[in-house]
Amino acid sequence: MRWPWRIVGILAVALAAGLASRAPRAEEMTALARLLPSQSRLADAGGGIEIDLALSQGVPYRAFLLDAPPRLVLDFSEVSFGHDRPEALNGSEAVRALSWGVVRPGWSRLVAELDGPYRIASAEERVQGAAGAAIRLKLLPEEAGRFAERARAGPPPAARWTLPRAAVPSEAPMRRQTGDRPLVVVLDPGHGGIDPGAETATEKEADVVLAFARDLSETLRRAGMTVVLTRDGDTFVPLETRISVARAARADVFLSIHADSLAEGEATGATVYKLAATASDSASAKLAERHDRGDLLAGVDLSGQDDTVAAVLMDLARSETEPRADRLAATIAAELKRAGIKMHRHPIQEAGFSVLKSPDIPSLLLEIGFLSSEEDRARFADPVWRSVMQGAILTALQGWAVADAAEARLIRQ
């Protein structure tokens, strides 16, 4: 049997040893590697967890562990997981949640949330030519201290996993818009890639809000505004990166777009969310937990993201930004209502969404409706409703920008 070129699947067993992995030559890969669910499994065995993933062809991969909560992360270059739900593959009681999807262009990710600390006892990839390939891992319970030490190290390096270039710092500090240039609006379609958001039998929140954001961006651009999307495809974007995109664009407004799902209470119609230290009601609290948890389930380590001094400085910056965001929220809600858009009975609410925490950019989260509502799903599919709603958002942004610029000119004088 002729083996193709050798690649190394770097594994965080002790973050010191690499395990060899084989994949076909690039020119021999005639299609994207596919997961074969009927031949794959996650199961409890021998006091640990066995993971068998059958693929249509070999791929480079890496595996590592993260903590809080304990997670196994598998990165692949690149695998299509098809339309199967991750939970259908999970036969292990020790795996509390399983998710997969695109995590960045050219790379897919599978994340298994574990019920406690484990170590990667063994891992291998066997390439079987036309028969495909198999990736097998064995996890065994680990002492908590050793697990935490390994998990803190984060992902091991990999030659084919290139990091994004850091944003070039602005030469001058960000200044409030005064009406002398186009308004810069960053639209943030929620979720994406490995984090599909709310789901029905036929729709994913990530797809619904991306389509809406694309149409809205065209509406705003035709009106002369500068628009940047945090994602323009089915790709996972971490929460902190979404804020970084807005800062790099020197945004005047950051608008995150969602269409979530709630099983309890009234969950229909559009809702505008602004930042608060605590949620305004239990539903808002649940949504905040779900939105932020998307990063954890996608394998992003959120530890060490806070700093006491930085938090104080950001709070000072928010003392100016928060009233501006409040006025924008009121303006958008009023324009949506004036346009006849169905609104939640509490159209403006507060929540601790991470994407609203930029200290220097007025930021809002707009739930255009809820996938859990049959009425809202019908509205999402109605081009007339979408056009009316997007026109109302444009009118609100235009009106707010004029008043905001006038205030900025007075402050500068």
Image (cartoon, rainbow, N blue to C red):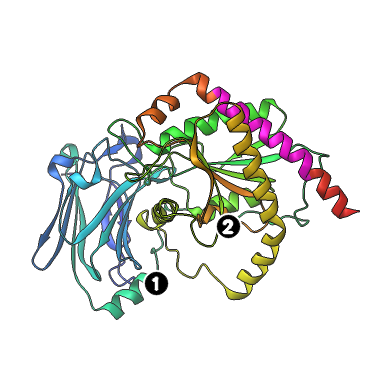
Horizontal and vertical percent position of residue 232: 51, 36
Can the viewer see residue 218? Answer: no
Magenta highlight range? 387-404
Q: Give yes or no for residue 294 being in the magenta stretch.
A: no
Say which amino acid is labelled 1: Arg
Direction from residue 198 to residue 118 in the image, left or right: left
Horizontal and vertical percent position of residue 62: 32, 57
How far apart, in angstroms, are the residues tagged by discs 2 and 1? Answer: 25 Å
The answer to whether 32 is drawn above or below residue 299 in the figure is above
Q: Mark 1 points at which residue?
A: 152
2 or 1: tag closer to the N-terminus: 1
Task: Report the disc number at residue 357.
Answer: 2
In the displayed image of the protein, which residue is found farthest to the top? 384
In the displayed image of the protein, which residue is found farthest to the right? 413
Q: Give yes or no for residue 393 being in the magenta stretch.
A: yes
- Image label count: 2
